[in-house]
Structure formats: structure tokens, C-alpha cells
Image (spheres, grey):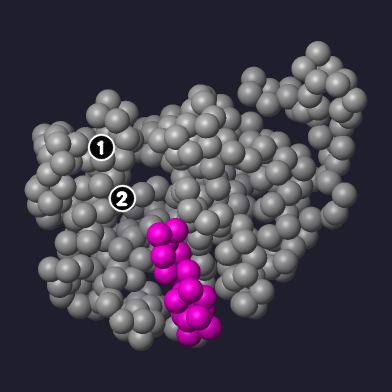
């Protein structure tokens, strides 16, 4: 299983950048940078590319609304170039709170826009004159929508790779089916190895049935909180807080993708209670309502033997890459834990 790390948009970039060589020496193979509505991920990934020689890089994620498909393709080709072919383009639809609330764009057709963005990116990387007639994107712009001077162009530079890997963040069944059909990699969140089939099994099977064999097996790139040793109340509390935030407060009461995921895992009543408490301002109580079983199932916590068993469960469920969120309080301990995990992972 490939070991990576997620660099949180809310902080941690400076420390991770300073420790990159130590993490690489400890066995880390990939660094992924999140974005949301923080500093952009692209500039940070470029910095990481300059600081490293072998570490793979990924965006986690660039959302498909605020950048045109052609710009996403250009950005990916540029990051792949400066990193020497080490970049994976992580895409996602984000959610209406970010797209409409921060970017001022309508959150429409996330599935269709993701599909068309993938198709356009691959045309750009093949250096084909860019023409695309889709439902959501038409390139060049039709004459009756602009000056009429647009013409098909192809990327000036020759990309290092004409097939840069694409990883898509997806939770809903239709979007997961699209990922299994079209993408090299999938970024789920709060992946329960014991219940993932209830949430996504049918969608994955549907997508795999249409998958081009040339894409190879789907890389399941999982963000996971991680600590070696008996987890402290502080560590468990942080994970509970995060789960409560997403299940309870990430979106409107009737449009929360993470709440829906918890329900598909079987936590129907619990998800409703977490959301009720969180939206009423009782955030601490919402965190306490998160089931202990869910906290531990979606994390990587415990003794070395316990973690070894958890790795087997994730691998059996199809996880191939871990994007770790190390929870140890001190930087040296986080590096040590990554080295320990690399040893367990073999």
C-alpha cells in the first residue's frame, strides 16, 4: 500500500515542507495538498516539486467550477513538468457552500461537469486542437456567444505525459460510478472498510463494467487520521470533532453528502442526531454522539499489531494509497509514526 500524506488547508504546510526530506526518508511516497477556500494548492505543490526529487504529488482537490477545464489541464501539465512527471490531478465538485458562497458560481451539474472536464483535460494533454461540444462546455466558444474569433488551439508545450493520472473525490453513488469508469484514482472520505459495499458497491460495479482496461486498476486514495499507540482522548476527540463537523454541519440539513454517507453505512438514527445537535449549536454534544465504532473504522489507530490488522482490512476493501493525517502532538513523533507504519506496511 502506498503511503502518502494530506497537507491540511487550515495549517501544517510550513511544518510539512520543513520535514519533507525526513518524511521521505521515513517511507512517505506521496504528498497531497488540499484547497477548499484556503490558499491555492497549486503554488504549494510547485514549492513541494522544487523541494523534492522522488516524492509523488497530488491535488486533493482542485474543484471543477472555478477553473476552466483547459486551465485545469494546463495547470496539471505544468505541475507534471516541474515535478518531472510526479503529479496526479485530483479533481472534485466540492459543494454549493464553497462554489456559490465563495466563488459566486451556480453549483449545477457536478456529475456532467466532472465528466466533461476529464475528457477535455485528456484532449489537451494529447495536444489535439481543442474542440469540444458538450452540454456544459463548448470549445471554441460559439460565434453567437462571443466575438466569433475563437479557433481550436492546441497546447503549445509538449507535456511530459499525455496521460497524467486523474484522481476524483466522490461520495455520491452516481459520481462514484463515474470515477470507476473514467478515472485512474478515487478519493473517498470516511471510508468504512466493513460497510463500503453498502455505500458504494453497486456504483463501483456499474462503473467498472464500463471501464477502459487501459486505465488499469482503480487507485483508491484514502484520507485517514493516523496515530501509533493507544489513542489518547485528545486524538479521539479531534476525530470526533471532524466527523461531527462533516456529518452534522457540512451543508444544509437536506443536502449534506457526508450525512448521507453515514446513513448508507447504517448509522441512520445516529446521523440524524449528530446533525440535529450540530445545527442547533450543540457541537460538543454532536461530537459525543458520533459512534465509537465509526471513529475507529475510518481511522488508523492503535498498537503496531492493531494497525497491521487495520491495514489488512483496508487492503481487502480495495484501498491502495493512504493519505495520512498524523495525529501525534510533536513533529518528531509524527515522522517516527510514519516510519513505523512504513515498517508495518512492508
Q: Which mark is residue 190?
A: 2
Residue 82 drawn at (x, y percent): 72, 66
Q: CA distance from mark 1 to mark 2?
A: 11 Å
The reply, left or right, for residue 188 in relation to residue 207 is left
Q: For the residue carrying disc 1, how many other residues have a C-alpha within 10 Å: few (<14), some (14-19), or many (20+)?
A: many
* Identity of the residue drawn at 73% across and 57% down: 78
The numbered mark, 1 or 2, whose residue comes first in the sequence reads: 2
Quadrant in which the C terminus is drawn:
bottom left
| Mark 2 closeness class: few <14, some 14–19, many ≥20 residues within 10 Å | many
Residue 213 x/y as whole percent: 61, 44
Nearest the camera: 304 or 12? 12
Q: Is residue 28 above or below residue 117?
A: below
* SS for dot 1: helix
Residue displayed at 17% across by 64% down: 236
Region in magenta: 1-23
Residue 91 among those drawn in magenta: no
Q: How many marks?
A: 2
Q: Decide whether residue 4 is among the magenta residues.
A: yes
> Looking at the image, can residue 1 be seen?
no
Q: Where's residue 38, x and y in %? A: 48, 53
Q: Quadrant of the N terminus?
A: bottom left
Q: In this view of the protein, which residue sits in the foreground, 211 or 174?
A: 174
Asked if one can make out residue 224 in the rendered structure from this viewpoint, the answer is: yes
Q: Quadrant of residue 251?
A: top left
Image location of residue 222, percent across then percent down = 40, 56
Residue with the mark numbered 1? 259
Amino acid at each position: 500500500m502506498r503511503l502518502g500524506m494530506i497537507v491540511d488547508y487550515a495549517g501544517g504546510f510550513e511544518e510539512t515542507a520543513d520535514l519533507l526530506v525526513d518524511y521521505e526518508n521515513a517511507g512517505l511516497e506521496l504528498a497531497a495538498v488540499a484547497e477548499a477556500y484556503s490558499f491555492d494548492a497549486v503554488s504549494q505543490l510547485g514549492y513541494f516539486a522544487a523541494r523534492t526529487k522522488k516524492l509523488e504529488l497530488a491535488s486533493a482537490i482542485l474543484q471543477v467550477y472555478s477553473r476552466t477545464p483547459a486551465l485545469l489541464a494546463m495547470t496539471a501539465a505544468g505541475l507534471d513538468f516541474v515535478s518531472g512527471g510526479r503529479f496526479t490531478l485530483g479533481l472534485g465538485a466540492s459543494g454549493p457552500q464553497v462554489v456559490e458562497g465563495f466563488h459566486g458560481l451556480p453549483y449545477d451539474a457536478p456529475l456532467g461537469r466532472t465528466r466533461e472536464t476529464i475528457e477535455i483535460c485528456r484532449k489537451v494533454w494529447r495536444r489535439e486542437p481543442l474542440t469540444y461540444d458538450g452540454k456544459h462546455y463548448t470549445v471554441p466558444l460559439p460565434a453567437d456567444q462571443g466575438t466569433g474569433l475563437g479557433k481550436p488551439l492546441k497546447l503549445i508545450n509538449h507535456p511530459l505525459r499525455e496521460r497524467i493520472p486523474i484522481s476524483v473525490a466522490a461520495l455520491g453513488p452516481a459520481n462514484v460510478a463515474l470515477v470507476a469508469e473514467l478515472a485512474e484514482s478515487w478519493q473517498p472520505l470516511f471510508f468504512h472498510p466493513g460497510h463500503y459495499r453498502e455505500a458504494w458497491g453497486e456504483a463501483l460495479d456499474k462503473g467498472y463494467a464500463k471501464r477502459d482496461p487501459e486505465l488499469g486498476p482503480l487507485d483508491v486514495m484514502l484520507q485517514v487520521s493516523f496515530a501509533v499507540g493507544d489513542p489518547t482522548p485528545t486524538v479521539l476527540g479531534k476525530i470526533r470533532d471532524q466527523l461531527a463537523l462533516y456529518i452534522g454541519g457540512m451543508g444544509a440539513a437536506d443536502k449534506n453528502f457526508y450525512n448521507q454517507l453515514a446513513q448508507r453505512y447504517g448509522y441512520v438514527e445516529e446521523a440524524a442526531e449528530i446533525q440535529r445537535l450540530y445545527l442547533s449549536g450543540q457541537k460538543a454534544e454532536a461530537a459525543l454522539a458520533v459512534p465509537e465504532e465509526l471513529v475507529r473504522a475510518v481511522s488508523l489507530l492503535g498498537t503496531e499489531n492493531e494497525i497491521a490488522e487495520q491495514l489488512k482490512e483496508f487492503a481487502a476493501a480495495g484501498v491502495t494509497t493512504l493519505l495520512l493525517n498524523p495525529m501525534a502532538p510533536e513533529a518528531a513523533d509524527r515522522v517516527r509514526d510514519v516510519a513505523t507504519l512504513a515498517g508495518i506496511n512492508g
